[in-house]
């Protein structure tokens, strides 16, 4: 795997003072956000990009709440957030908007992906394995509600830390689909 790694820079945020480092894999520029110190078994959140949620504050999904929760969690307890540029479960932004348009006609998130010719989840995690090797980390506490993620990464999971974010009337259908169809623990 051909990966270019940036230098480490300081990044003060509303959630706390972090350091960041970018890992470029082809056209995808991923970001590692870390506290200056962390334990030998660090707390880790692997977050996939959701432009509409993370940046615009969409309440169709719970991505922004999960990201904020993770950043606040590592600020308090130390750790790492790996921000993966896998927009829309890796179907890309344009296809995600098309999937949203299908959802406007009554399909759920998985049915919409299938109608567009994609699997319900196209994400892969090889770059995550690379990042952990690079950072010399072989065991983590993983912040996730997604049991599938536990099986897709090579690093040893010491403990799963649940992410607690609220259900709203706007994201209820989406969260129920994730829980019922994709086995998320919500
Ligand atoms: Zn989202």
Image (spheres, rainbow, N blue to C red):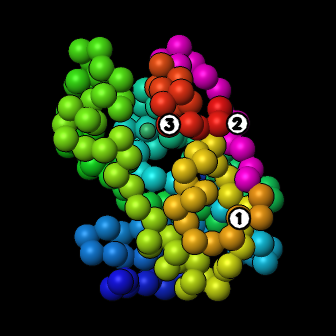
| Secondary structure beneath label 2 | loop
N-terminal-most mark, 1 or 3: 1
Kindly identify which residue carries mark 3: 182
- For disc 3, the neighbor class at 10 Å (few under 14, some 14 to 19, many from 20) is some
Q: Is the residue 142 above or below the residue 135 in the image?
A: above
Whether label 3 lies within 8 Å of ligand 1 gets the answer: no
Location of residue 26 (image quadrant)? bottom left
Location of residue 6 (image quadrant)? bottom left
* Magenta stretch: helix, strand or loop mostly: loop
- The N terminus: image quadrant: bottom left
Q: Is residue 168 magenta?
A: yes
- Highlighted magenta segment, given as a residue range: 160-172
Is there CB contact under 8 Å for labels 3 and 2?
A: no
| Foreground of the two, 24 or 116 | 116
Q: Quadrant of ligand 1?
A: top left
Which percent across, then down, holds residue 100? 28, 28
Kindly identify which residue carries mark 1: 157
């Amino acid at each position: 795997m051909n990966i270019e790694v940036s230098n480490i820079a300081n990044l003060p945020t509303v959630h706390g003072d972090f350091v960041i480092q970018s890992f470029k894999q082809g056209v995808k520029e991923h970001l590692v956000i870390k506290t200056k110190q962390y334990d030998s078994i660090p707390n880790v959140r692997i977050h996939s990009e959701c432009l509409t949620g993370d940046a615009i504050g969409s309440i169709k999904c719970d991505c922004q709440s999960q990201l904020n929760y993770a950043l606040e969690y590592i600020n308090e307890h130390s750790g790492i957030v790996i921000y993966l540029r896998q927009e829309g479960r890796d179907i890309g932004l344009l296809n995600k908007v098309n999937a949203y348009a299908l959802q406007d006609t009554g399909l759920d998130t998985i049915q919409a992906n299938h109608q567009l010719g994609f699997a319900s989840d196209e994400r892969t995690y090889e770059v995550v394995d690379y990042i952990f090797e690079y950072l010399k980390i072989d065991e983590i506490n993983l912040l996730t509600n997604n049991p599938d993620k536990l099986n897709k990464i090579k690093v040893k999971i010491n403990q799963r830390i649940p992410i607690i974010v609220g259900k709203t009337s706007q994201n209820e259908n989406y969260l129920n689909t994730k829980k019922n169809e994709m086995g998320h623990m919500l």
